[in-house]
């Protein structure tokens, strides 16, 4: 009997994954902004069943976000215009982080800023917090010094954020989260990789809009917003696959992942790990189900996660 | 206990007034007036999101409405919702047959503060339309309850008959005057309001705003149940923010989440200009 089969016979599926130094017990994380600060989900699931939780995006100062309505449902998806509302990095460290110290999974902090310096300062403050194992840089934020153009659509500005954050931390793993609202995702992948990111997650929400035809008004207070949910999955998957063709660092697939099958699509296309986002709104235990489901799949196919990753056979 | 579960439809029928009664088999406890649940159809991703509906009544194992005791929290073997069909989600809900399953998250929200905890067993409840929902259970908790129900017409007003077995006086107003007083429910409130009244209100935003203003100028306490579009129902998507007046804002600033910090708020804390 081969070693691999022995392994499976013992019923111990090894679904752990190493993202360039960051070791996760399994490849399933929760997407930022869809899982609060984690503890909100303890009545519904076991946080220890996840590879990591990624908390709501943090900025240097608290932000109150956008006017209502902030949510509009669209076919198989939703638009949001929350406006990056958050309690700020200091309140996160003092009020939320102590509560997360004992959970048996990694905590990743999603960070953003309006200037390169703000990104770095948020990262620096998290560097001393043992509980936080990585930062995920959300580059889908307007750059005030460039007239509000989003960092994530400009390879030069995006690289600047990543390289300076990377230089300002030692211990923290740096994951960079790409915006899909670009012409060629490969350009962004190369830019942030050269800037030194340890891993790349993609995608953030796609920009979108919806109109109330009776009122002839936009269905979001800010007119446009970010589309998420199953509706964006094929777009996210294609971008992940394209990124996998050029990236050397591990990739984390995000976008519409609702079931185990969805997650497997991304892993087969080249993702080292995945994030479950909007699905947690429909079923608060969705991420746990996906994690269990991946184990079952590996067992059923007698495969390891690394064998599965990128195993797509194209014509 | 807050839980995510599947529940079987016991009944889902149109009432005399057009609103639908949905009975679900679900073992539930810790239920309070003003609690709500997020409901969705399993096995579909379109519509994607759950819809919030307020808890109306509590059922026994046979699906009969439980006679309510003056004791909170409530528990039962089933729960009843009362809802209007207004769009896609509620249309889909209206098509559910007995035996079908729904996904359910709840009970959610803070619920109304209990009169006993506020040192009284007397209160005025003001409900507009589907705003009747939290007051069936609330009326059961009061010794001296008054329910003022604002309905559109005679058909809607018939819902007030649900309250006939409760120790509670009911007064109805209709916009067309077909039943009860003609006009808005706030006119009924004006007749009853005194500085020591405790007012609970649920209904359209304009009604709530008016009730809040009337209670404030009479020097009475009032609590309102607010509605916002919701995605998660548990305070994580930040979609259902409501603006709090600066002087009542806590360390976390001027926004509160209707789903997790509400839906019931002390009306003096709300920035009503931001609502309507
Ligand atoms: C805490 C809470 C408790 C609620 N309890 C009840 C209840 O007990 N019974 C009940 O009938 N309804 C209740 N509602 C309102 C109910 O959630 C909405 O009517 C429902 O979500 C509409 O879904 P839909 O898909 O049918 O409509 P959509 O397709 O989403 O919308 C159709 C139309 O209805 C309007 N609409 C959508 N949401 C609301 C809303 N929240 N209030 C008023 N109009 C809306 C939209 O503007 C649109 O014009 C409650 C809402 C909240 C937030
Ligand atoms: C309500 C909401 C809030 C979000 N907030 C953030 C955020 O703070 N930072 C971030 O990087 N992404 C945020 N996102 C994007 C998600 O993390 C994810 O990239 C996106 O929703 C696509 O995945 P999904 O379709 O699985 O939800 C948010 C998404 C939603 C729906
Ligand atoms: S509905 Fe998500 S925070 Fe209230």
Image (tube, coloured by chain):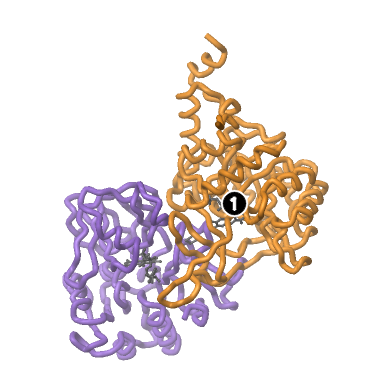
Chain colours: A orange, B purple
Residue A159 falls left or right of residue B55: right
Q: Callout 1: helix, strand or loop? A: loop
Q: How many marks?
A: 1
Confirm whether residue B216 shows in the render.
yes
Q: Is residue B58 visible?
A: no
Q: Residue furthest top?
A: A1
Looking at the picture, how far across and down is residue B185, in whole percent? 30, 85
Query: Residue A53 lies in what quarter of the image?
Result: top right
Query: Quick one: label 1, few (<14), some, or many (20+) residues within 10 Å?
Result: many
B78 is higher (above) or lower (below) than B225 = above
Give the percent coordinates (x, y) of residue A192: 75, 47
- Between A210 and B11, the residue placed more toward the observer is A210
Residue placed at 32% from the left, 47% from the top?
B6
Q: Is residue A83 left or right of residue B149?
A: right
Chain containing the residue with disc 1: A
Asked if residue B160 is positioned above or below residue A16 in the image, the reply reads below
| Cβ of mark 1 under 8 A from ligand 2 | yes
Residue B47, given in percent of the width and then of the height, sits at 39, 56
Residue B236: where, in percent of width, then height?
52, 56
Q: Which residue is mark 1?
A: A32
Determine whether B25 is above or below B230 in the image. Answer: above
Looking at the rendering, in which quadrant would you find the C terminus of chain A? Answer: top right
| Occupied quadrant, residue A94 | bottom right
Query: Going 38% across and 60% down the picture, which residue do you hit?
Result: B51
The quadrant holding residue B245 is bottom right
Say which residue appears at 53% left-offset and 45% top-offset. A276
Residue located farthest toward the front when viewing the structure as drawn: A315
Q: Residue at x 63, y 49 (%)?
A: A98
């Amino acid at each position: 009997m081969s070693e691999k089969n022995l392994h499976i016979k013992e019923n111990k599926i090894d679904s752990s994954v190493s993202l360039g130094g960051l070791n996760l017990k399994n490849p399933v994380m929760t997407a930022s902004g869809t899982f609060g600060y984690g503890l909100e989900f303890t009545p519904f699931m076991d946080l220890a069943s996840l590879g990591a939780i990624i908390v709501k995006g943090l900025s240097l100062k608290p932000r109150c976000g956008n006017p209502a309505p902030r949510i509009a449902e669209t076919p198989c998806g939703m638009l949001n215009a929350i406006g990056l509302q958050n309690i700020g990095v200091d309140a996160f460290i003092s009020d939320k982080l102590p509560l997360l110290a004992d959970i048996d999974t990694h905590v990743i902090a999603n960070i953003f800023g309006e200037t390169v310096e703000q990104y770095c300062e948020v990262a620096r403050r998290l560097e001393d917090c043992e509980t936080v194992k990585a930062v995920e840089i959300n580059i889908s934020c307007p750059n005030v010094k460039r007239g509000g153009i989003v960092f994530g659509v400009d390879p030069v500005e995006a690289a600047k954020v990543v390289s300076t954050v990377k230089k300002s931390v030692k211990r923290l793993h740096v994951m960079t989260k790409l915006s899909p609202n670009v012409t060629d995702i490969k350009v962004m992948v190369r830019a942030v990789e050269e800037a030194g990111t340890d891993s790349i997650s993609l995608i953030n929400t796609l920009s979108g809009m919806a109109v109330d035809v009776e009122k002839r008004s936009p269905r979001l207070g800010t007119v446009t917003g970010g589309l998420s949910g199953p509706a964006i999955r094929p777009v996210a998957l294609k971008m992940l696959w394209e990124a996998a063709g050029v990236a050397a660092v591990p990739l984390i697939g995000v976008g519409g992942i609702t079931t185990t099958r969805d997650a497997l699509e991304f892993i087969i296309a080249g993702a080292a790990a995945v994030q479950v986002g909007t699905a947690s709104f429909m079923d608060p235990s969705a991420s746990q189900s996906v994690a269990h489901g991946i184990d079952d799949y590996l067992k059923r196919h007698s495969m390891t996660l690394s064998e599965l990753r990128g195993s797509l056979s194209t014509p | 206990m807050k839980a995510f579960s599947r529940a079987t439809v016991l009944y889902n029928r149109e009432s005399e007034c057009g609103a639908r009664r949905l009975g679900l088999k679900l073992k539930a406890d810790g239920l309070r007036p003003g609690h709500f649940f997020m409901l969705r159809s399993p096995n579909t991703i379109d519509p994607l999101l759950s819809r919030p509906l307020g808890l109306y009544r509590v059922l026994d194992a046979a699906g009969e409405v439980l006679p309510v005791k003056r004791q909170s929290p409530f528990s039962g073997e089933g729960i009843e919702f009362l809802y209007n069909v207004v769009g896609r989600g509620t249309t889909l809900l209206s098509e559910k047959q007995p035996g079908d399953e729904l996904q359910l998250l709840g009970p959610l929200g803070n619920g109304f503060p209990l009169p006993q905890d506020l040192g009284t067993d007397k209160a005025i409840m003001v409900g507009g339309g589907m705003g009747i929902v939290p007051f069936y259970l609330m009326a059961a908790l009061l010794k001296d309850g008054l329910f003022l129900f604002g309905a559109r017409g005679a058909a809607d007003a018939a819902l007030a008959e649900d309250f006939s077995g409760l120790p509670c006086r009911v007064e109805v107003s209709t916009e067309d005057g077909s039943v009860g007083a003609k006009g808005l429910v706030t006119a009924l409130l004006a007749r009853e309001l005194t500085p020591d009244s405790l007012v609970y209100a649920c209904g359209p935003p304009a009604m709530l705003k008016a009730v809040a203003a009337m209670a404030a100028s009479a020097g009475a306490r009032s609590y309102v149940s607010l509605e916002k579009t919701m995605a998660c129902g548990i305070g994580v998507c930040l979609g259902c923010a409501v603006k709090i007046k600066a002087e009542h804002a806590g360390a976390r600033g001027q926004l509160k989440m209707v789903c997790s910090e509400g839906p019931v708020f002390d009306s003096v804390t709300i920035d009503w200009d931001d609502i309507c």
